[in-house]
């Protein structure tokens, strides 16, 4: 945690969820509003097909809805893509860009991720920029170098503490049940804080830095207790209301 930064717990449903999954979303919103004391922000990033109806379910609750990617243009001939403005039009208030699955599956480079992040800001969305090293890079001792390269190349110049969130997600920890040691998370987040503060001044000092990769109710408290970890980006465990709320509860307890 960082003093004076309100943590964010963001869920990423990835390519999961049909209309009937909105019942689970209803369980999240009801459970969240009933049990939490507004010490953390909560966001669920859903497949594009569900954003509009999910925003309706979440209307009037403290749960925000977001998208998982956006094109860097506002509109045009880009078959299969959606823009930041479309996410906003559907009721979304946030977008994830540069997730390692996009970087790997769709060949997204730092400069593409940066354009997408700029689009997120243009669309007035809270923009979550993901970075993280692969297993091979960690084993080769290149982790901090990779993080620097991704931060330098993917963060928009107009990033502020209000409009941008950075998520550190070691690729080898995503969906594997493997989690880096507390020391490793601490080192990565301290490095990110230093880099962002050097570049963005007080905004960098206050920007929310999320940890992502196999976050579960059982390890959330330990992860959140690490300096400069200001929340979580949660994949698998965000699909079940009970697990996701368990993570939020662990974080709220510390605030
Ligand atoms: P996981 O995914 O929680 O299933 O490991 C995290 C992510 O990819 O954001």
Image (spheres, grey):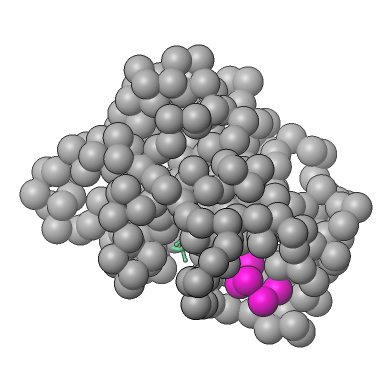
Residue drawn 14% across the image and 58% down it: 136
Residue 60 within the segment the image draws in magenta: no
x, y (%) of residue 250? Answer: 64, 46
x, y (%) of residue 23? Answer: 80, 76
Give 124 or 194, whichever is nearer the viewer: 124
Q: Is residue 190 above or below residue 155?
A: above
Looking at the rendered structure, the number of numbered marks drawn on it comes to 0
Residue drawn 62% across the image and 30% down it: 162
x, y (%) of residue 125? Answer: 64, 46
Farthest residue toward the left? 140
Is residue 242 rendered to the left or right of residue 33?
left
Which part of the image, by quadrant, shows the C terminus? Answer: top right
Farthest residue toward the right? 60
Is residue 5 rendered to the left or right of residue 223?
right
Give 30 or 193, whichever is nearer the viewer: 193
Q: Quadrant of residue 167?
A: top left
What segment carries the magenta color? 44-50
Residue drawn 42% across the image and 48% down it: 115
The reply to whether residue 183 is in sight is no
The reply to whether residue 89 is in sight is yes
Is residue 30 rendered to the left or right of residue 233?
right
Residue 45 within the segment the image draws in magenta: yes
x, y (%) of residue 66? Answer: 65, 57
Give 153 or 203, whichever is nearer the viewer: 153
Residue drawn 36% across the image and 43% down it: 154
Q: Quadrant of residue 231?
A: top right
């Amino acid at each position: 945690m960082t003093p004076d930064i309100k943590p964010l717990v963001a869920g990423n449903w990835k390519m999961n969820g049909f209309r009937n999954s909105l019942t689970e979303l209803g369980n999240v919103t009801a459970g969240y509003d009933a049990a939490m004391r507004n010490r953390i922000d909560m966001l669920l990033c859903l497949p594009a097909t569900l954003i509009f109806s999910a925003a309706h379910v979440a209307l009037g609750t403290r749960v925000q809805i977001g998208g998982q990617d956006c094109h860097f243009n506002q509109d045009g001939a880009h078959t299969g893509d959606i823009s930041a403005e479309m996410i906003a039009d559907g009721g979304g208030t946030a977008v994830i860009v540069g997730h390692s699955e996009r970087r790997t599956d769709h060949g997204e480079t730092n400069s593409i991720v940066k354009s997408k992040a700029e689009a997120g800001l243009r669309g007035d969305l809270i923009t979550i920029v993901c970075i993280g090293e692969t297993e091979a890079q960690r084993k080769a001792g290149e982790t901090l170098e990779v993080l620097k390269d991704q931060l330098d190349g993917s963060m928009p110049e107009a990033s502020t503490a209000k409009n941008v969130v950075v998520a550190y997600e070691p690729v080898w920890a995503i969906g594997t049940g493997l989690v880096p040691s507390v020391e490793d998370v601490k080192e990565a987040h301290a490095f990110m804080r230093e880099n962002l503060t050097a570049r963005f001044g007080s905004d960098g000092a206050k920007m929310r830095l999320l940890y992502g990769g196999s976050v579960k109710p059982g390890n959330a408290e330990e992860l959140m207790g690490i300096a400069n970890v200001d929340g979580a980006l949660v994949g698998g465990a965000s699909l079940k209301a009970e697990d996701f709320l368990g993570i939020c509860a662990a974080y709220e307890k510390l605030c």
